[in-house]
Image (cartoon, grey):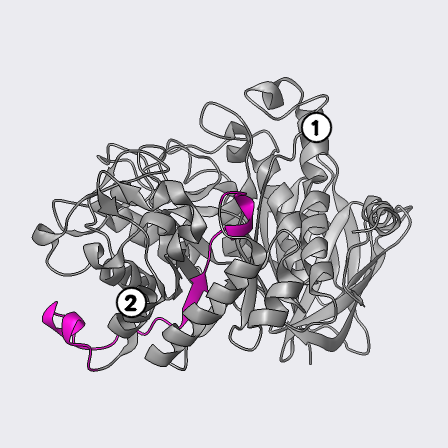
Amino acid sequence: MRRRSFLKDASMAAAGIAAAGRFELTAQVAPQSGGPAPLVVEPTPLFELSPYLYMQFMEPLGATDGSVEAAWDHLADRWREDVVAVTRDLAPTMMRWGGIFADFYRWREGVGPRDKRPSMLNLLWGGVESNQVGTAEFVGLCKTVGAEPLICVNFESDGRQQYMKAKGSVRTADASEAAAWVGYCNDAGNADRKAHGTVNPLGVRFWQIGNETSYDKNGFDLETAARKTVEFSKAMRAADPAIQLIAWGDSGWAGRMADVAGEHVQYLAFHHMFDPDSPKQPVLRGELYRRDPDAAWAQLMTAWQTSDAKIRSARESLGSRRLPLALTECHFVIPARDRGDVLSTWAAGVSYARILNNHQRHGDVLKIATAADFCGTRWQNNAVMIPVPKGNNRAYLQPVARVMQLYRHHIGSHAVKATGIPDGLDVVASRRGNTVFLHVANTRRTAPVKAALQVAGHAIRGGRVFEISEDSTVELSYLNSAEVMKTVERPLTADGRWEFPPASVSAVEIALP
């Protein structure tokens, strides 16, 4: 991104204006004085919003964070009931299996009778994986909670030599192994799957080729990765022509990858894990956020700008090429006892609301996106926290997941424009039929913001507001997860006047005649 363009974008962000490509979906107004300012929705659809903007990402994280082993009930040979229940509440539209774990994962070790599955070393995260959770178990969870499964294949270890062998075991896999995995999942007559007791195809439509391939200088270079992406795509599509393929396109790779492999893939992936803290005067790491809530709040409220710059750089690297983008990993990485303790606060929830709003602004190109890892026992950047030992402690949703759940259940099919946004609010709008939806984050920590909601050319018949309103310093744990950060439904009258509480996140449904 050119420096001049970046500075222009930064100044727009500071004024509260965010645009996706040529679409300006919000327009700010001067601070309020007197009565509520009119917040006007222009109901003409601009572009279709993908249902996969609230996906979850699952990777076995070994000794680091028990994301898979802790979620699996090894005595009952099933997913923990509390994990399934809370995931149903979260209602992710898509779940991804893979990550760097895919670089040393051999999928055949995770299928068939469980008592015959070999264990494996987790070469990145440490520990030993039992492989009790494999393809059928992952897809089964997806189907149980209504999510579309997305699988990341072993892309010849992304060229990383350190993951190709371990104690004499070959850990890398080629295009034929990826194609065989597609066949195992989707071929109606696959003999191996049937022998393992699953008669009907698993129906995995989405597959990712390459995970953070550009992040390791000792891995594949761009030209090698692009050439091998074509090879994998052809082999995998030969097994099932109907699958949707995602190639790696981060670090400026998108344009060249599109030129070489674009006719063979449907999406280009990029990731964004970042520390939103100030490098010069940190206020979020460790326990610092507790010492100065105002400073922590101010820093978290600017985090979306870093996320926006990353998305814009991915868009710019595409140039005029029209391939959708897939943000298949995204979250904060803040040093702390449990990797980002501040992420258990409601301040982080509001910060993530702004990031999710910005995902929607880029929804003309961004078609798959997330803002959290799926589950685990320690890392606070998970959507679902799993207390261990199980006992009477139940899995619960983190602040980021509370917002994802709220937005996921109250969103339209097409983006529309909102104008006259009162100072202090971050707003995006969408529409489905005769219902207009607003996602609203009040970025003022201690002050409410009033607005007079209007829809251009339409009278309002009323509506509903689904609201999470909490003190920004409140922190979630298994001890209070049922009492705090709850979504409350309130009626919206036909005059459209509304007061958004301090540090709140709301999903507004406006009914049109």
Q: Circle 2: is it few (<14), some (14-19), or many (20+) Cα within 10 Å?
A: many
Pick whichever, 453 or 10, lies toward us.
10
Q: Give me the residue at 58% from left, 42% from top.
A: 349
Residue 195 is covered by the magenta coloring: yes
Q: Which residue is mark 1?
A: 278
* Figure quadrant of residue 180: bottom left
Pick whichever, 65 or 377, lies toward us.
65
As displayed, is residue 25 above or below residue 304?
A: below
Q: Give me the residue at 47% from left, 35% from top.
A: 380
* Figure quadrant of residue 457: bottom right
Q: Which mark is drawn over residue 181?
A: 2
Pick whichever, 7 or 238, lies toward us.
238
Task: Tell me the quarter of the image containing the C terminus.
Answer: bottom right
Q: Circle 1: is it few (<14), some (14-19), or many (20+) Cα within 10 Å?
A: few
User: Residue 51 at what x, y percent from top left?
Assistant: 53, 68
User: Residue 360 at what x, y percent from top left?
Assistant: 65, 61
Residue 63 is covered by the magenta coloring: no
Q: Is residue 257 left or right of 41 when viewed as pictured? A: left
The amino acid at mark 2 is: Trp
Helix, strand, or loop for circle 2?
Answer: helix
The amino acid at mark 1 is: Ser
The tally of labels here is: 2
Q: Is residue 447 left or right of 160 when viewed as pictured? A: right
User: Residue 394 at what x, y percent from top left?
Assistant: 31, 40
Q: CA distance from mark 1 to mark 2?
A: 44 Å
Can residue 292 be seen here? yes
In the displayed image of the protein, which residue is found farthest to the top?
291
As displayed, is residue 150 above or below residue 44?
A: above
Q: Which comes sooner in the sequence, label 1 or label 2?
A: 2
Can residue 49 be seen here? no
Read off the magenta span: 189-218
